[in-house]
Amino acid sequence: MKRTAKAQWKGNLKDGKGELTTPSGILSKTNYSFKTRFEEGVTGTNPEELLAAAHAGCFTMAVAAILTRQGLTPDSLNTEAIVSMEGLSITGVHLIISGSVSGITADEFTAVTKEAEKNCLISKVLSIPVTSEASYI
């Protein structure tokens, strides 16, 4: 399986702008720019926000998967992912989850979330090799 996304950019770094598009159509020419990345109050997204969304979704699904393997069905799971940056470096991701699950204690829920924290695909991908290829037109 492969998932794709496309980015298009026009202009210089600070004044230029781009668009992000995914085959699902959820992102369709979605605005991103230097301003949406580094300034407050500008409409559009940025790579760090998208990373936070991906990590929150992946982590929450991993928690649900572990609970399902244990024969439990969560009533609700809600996660916030906070991507921290210092300068131009991502320094960490903090995941905050709340859940309502019948048949499990708070300690057991915490153990499930710690397992998901280590094993969700986005947590793992943050340390894999990245490759690229280029063509100049």
Image: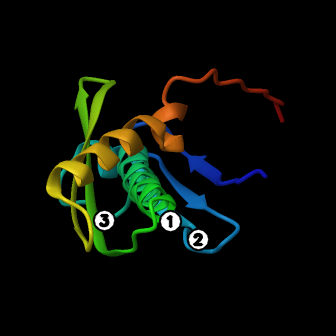
Say if mark 2 contacts mark 3, CB within 8 Å. Answer: no
Inter-mark Cα distance, 2 to 3: 15 Å
The residue positioned 48% from the left and 30% from the top of the image is 126
User: Pointer 3: what residue?
Assistant: 43
What element does badge 3 sit on? loop
The residue positioned 62% from the left and 63% from the top of the image is 21
Q: Is residue 100 above or below residue 137?
A: below
Q: Image check: 87 left or right of 30?
A: left
Q: Is residue 9 above or below residue 85?
A: below
User: Pointer 2: what residue?
Assistant: 28
Say if mark 1 contacts mark 2, CB within 8 Å. Answer: yes
Where is residue 25 drawn, in percent x and y? Answer: 63, 74
Question: Which amino acid, by three-letter code, is at mark 2?
Answer: Ser
Decide which of tag 3 and tag 1 comes sooner along the chain: 1
Where is residue 122 drawn, in percent x and y? Answer: 49, 42
Of 62 and 107, the residue lying toward us: 107
Q: Image check: 18 left or right of 38?
A: right
Where is residue 50 drawn, in percent x and y? Answer: 42, 52
Of 99 and 89, the residue lying toward us: 99
Q: Nearer the viewer, mark 2 or mark 3?
A: 2
The residue positioned 31% from the left and 40% from the top of the image is 114
Name the mark on residue 54: none
Where is residue 84 drawn, in percent x and y? Answer: 23, 35
What element does badge 1 sit on? strand
User: Pointer 1: what residue?
Assistant: 30
Question: Which amino acid, by three-letter code, is at mark 3?
Answer: Thr
